[in-house]
């Protein structure tokens, strides 16, 4: 009998979807597998491929105890296909088919829309691994290196999750799309990744922490919406992916928090009260708070662009067809069809920012972005607690969502982080204080010196409060194989 909770390791590809009896899909995936391994081998520097990394591997989808921790060489990581258990009697949660039984096969009329959403989601997963490929060389500790590689192997698994859906449900063109997911490359001229933020560089560890806090959180919101899909296999896939995604945002939040904590500690130890005494603060090998704020501004606004246009008929169609729901759809108290509902979206009228009501169906992206901003504010509040506790007069803030935007109603206008429309000249003058400049980047880069001794940390970051899997402070999270 098919065991839907525990993962079968009897095939090349661990899974809980009965692959060993699904010869067609198994064959297709086994054909795709070498290309994936090549992609991984070309990507991660060789000496880290041979290192033993203390990783968690999903061995079950049971909410309690789904993971097992052990030393693994990354190319030998068991990337599996895991779907959350089928909920009996599940119905389509939204749109014109709301209340009908969830689809177990692809609904023909929505095939292309569904495929496109799966491909876009799938494209982001390997992209972030590509962006983060060089960070192992400058890891501030073995603990952080281990977390980086954990995030990387799980993004690899998320790629597998989307590729499985393409192979299983979309025939020949699904196979083609799966191949293309390995053909595109982050930042490539000829074949870039599909979304802007996934073609940006992740040049240093603070960028990595900001990325996992802000951009993985966009991923979370998208997965939450797809977990509400009326197409049940997609819903089940995304539900399990979300359990892994939580760790990625934890890495981001605690990474930024530890960076802030270290700066505050150095300021206190050396009697520096003024957070803008930048040169002095930097001379101690820590990152000043205003520069951390600039990094925050950059990554938050890049991530906002991932939500697309505020008013979107594509988003309306995806909701109305029941392919993609809203954040926490099942907990929202309305008709789940949005026939007459409205939602306030941002617009520009005579150079003024206003929010006005539009049909809620067309404002699905705006609503998800609002949910995202609320969610992202939580960690910022916790970072401020660290600064407050140190008695430093400085507050991290999410910039206004009009600032630094390339997509949506704010694109092609200049706003400052407070959300005021400014002239091009004012913008050029302010930009040095609002976004990281070359000198900031160079300074941060100068701190990126690897620390590979167990229990030791780079100058600019505090140790974590607790270890992964409750390991002690000097635990050797990565047994390095240095060539
Ligand atoms: Fe992911
Ligand atoms: Fe992630």
Image (cartoon, helix red, strand yellow):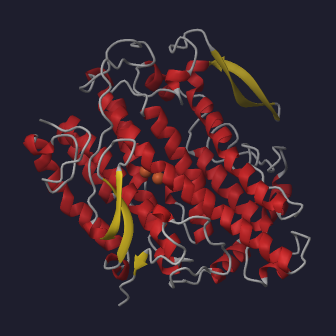
Residue at left offset 25%, top offset 25%: 104
Left or right of residue 200: residue 268: right
Q: Where is residue 68 in the image (x, y as percent from the top left)?
A: 34, 58
Quarter of the image for residue 185 reads: bottom left
Q: Above or below — where is 415 with respect to 268?
A: above
Check the picture and name the quadrant holding the C terminus: bottom left
State whether residue 278 appears in this view. Answer: no
Side of 33 relative to 154 (left or right): left
What residue is shown at x 72% (from left), y 73% (from top)? 440
Quarter of the rendering occupied by the N terminus: top left
* Residue nearest the observer in this picture, 196 or 456: 456
**In the picture shown, does residue 185 fall above or below 89?**
below
Above or below: residue 152 compared with residue 140: above
* Tag count: 0
**Residue that lies at the very extreme toward the bottom in this rendered image:** 483
Which quadrant of the view contains residue 323? top left
Q: Observer-nearest residue: 131 or 309?
A: 131
Q: Residue at x 34, y 39 (%)?
A: 237
Residue drawn at x 36%, y 71% is: 43
- Observer-nearest residue: 197 or 69? 69
Residues 101 and 182: in front is 101
Note whether 34 is above or below 315 in the view shown. below
Position of residue 395 measured from the top left corner of the image (x, y, whole percent): 83, 56
Indicate the position of residue 157 as horizontal and vertical percent values.
33, 54
Q: Is residue 163 visible?
A: yes
- Residue 376 percent across, percent down from the top left: 65, 45
């Amino acid at each position: 009998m098919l065991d839907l909770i525990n993962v079968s390791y009897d095939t090349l590809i661990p899974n809980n979807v009965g692959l060993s009896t699904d010869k067609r899909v198994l064959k297709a995936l086994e054909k795709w597998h070498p290309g994936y391994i090549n992609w991984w081998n070309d990507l991660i520097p060789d000496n880290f491929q041979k290192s033993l990394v203390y990783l968690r591997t999903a061995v079950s989808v049971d909410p309690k105890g789904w993971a097992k921790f052990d030393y693994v060489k990354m190319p030998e990581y068991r990337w599996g296909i895991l779907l959350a258990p089928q909920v009996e009697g599940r119905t389509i949660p939204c749109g014109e088919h709301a209340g009908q039984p969830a689809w177990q096969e692809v609904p023909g009329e929505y095939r292309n829309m569904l495929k496109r959403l799966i491909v876009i989601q799938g494209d982001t997963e390997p992209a972030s691994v590509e962006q983060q490929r060089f960070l192992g060389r400058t890891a501030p500790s073995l603990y952080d290196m281990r977390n980086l590689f954990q995030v990387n192997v799980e993004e690899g698994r998320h790629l597998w999750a989307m590729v499985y859906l393409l192979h299983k449900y979309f025939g020949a063109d699904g196979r083609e799309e799966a191949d293309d997911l390995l053909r595109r490359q982050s930042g490539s001229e000829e074949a870039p990744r599909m979304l802007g933020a996934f073609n940006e560089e992740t040049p240093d560890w603070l960028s990595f922490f900001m990325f996992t806090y802000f951009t993985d959180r966009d991923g979370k919101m998208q997965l939450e919406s797809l977990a509400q899909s009326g197409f049940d296999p997609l819903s089940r896939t995304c539900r399990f992916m979300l359990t892994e995604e939580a760790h990625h945002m934890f890495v981001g939040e605690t990474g930024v928090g530890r960076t802030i904590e270290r700066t505050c500690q150095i300021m206190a130890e050396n009697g520096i009260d003024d957070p803008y005494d930048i040169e002095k603060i930097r001379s101690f090998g820590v990152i000043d708070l205003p520069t951390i704020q600039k990094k925050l501004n950059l990554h938050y606004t890049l991530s906002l662009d991932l939500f697309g246009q505020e008013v979107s008929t594509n988003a309306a169609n995806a909701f109305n067809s029941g392919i993609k729901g809203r954040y926490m759809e099942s907990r929202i108290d309305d008709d789940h069809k949005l026939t007459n509902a409205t939602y306030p979206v941002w617009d520009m009228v005579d150079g003024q920012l206003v929010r006005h009501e539009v049909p809620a169906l067309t404002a699905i992206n705006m609503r998800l972005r609002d949910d995202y901003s609320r969610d992202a504010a939580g960690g910022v509040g916790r970072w401020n607690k660290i600064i407050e506790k140190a008695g430093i007069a400085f507050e991290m803030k999410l910039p206004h969502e009009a600032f630094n935007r390339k997509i949506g109603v704010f694109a092609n206008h200049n706003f400052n982080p407070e959300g005021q429309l400014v002239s091009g000249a004012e913008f050029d003058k302010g930009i040095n204080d609002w976004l990281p400049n070359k000198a900031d980047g160079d300074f941060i880069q100068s701190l990126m010196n690897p620390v590979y001794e167990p229990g030791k940390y780079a100058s600019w970051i505090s140790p974590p409060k607790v270890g992964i899997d409750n390991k002690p402070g000097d635990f050797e999270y990565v047994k390095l194989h240095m060539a």
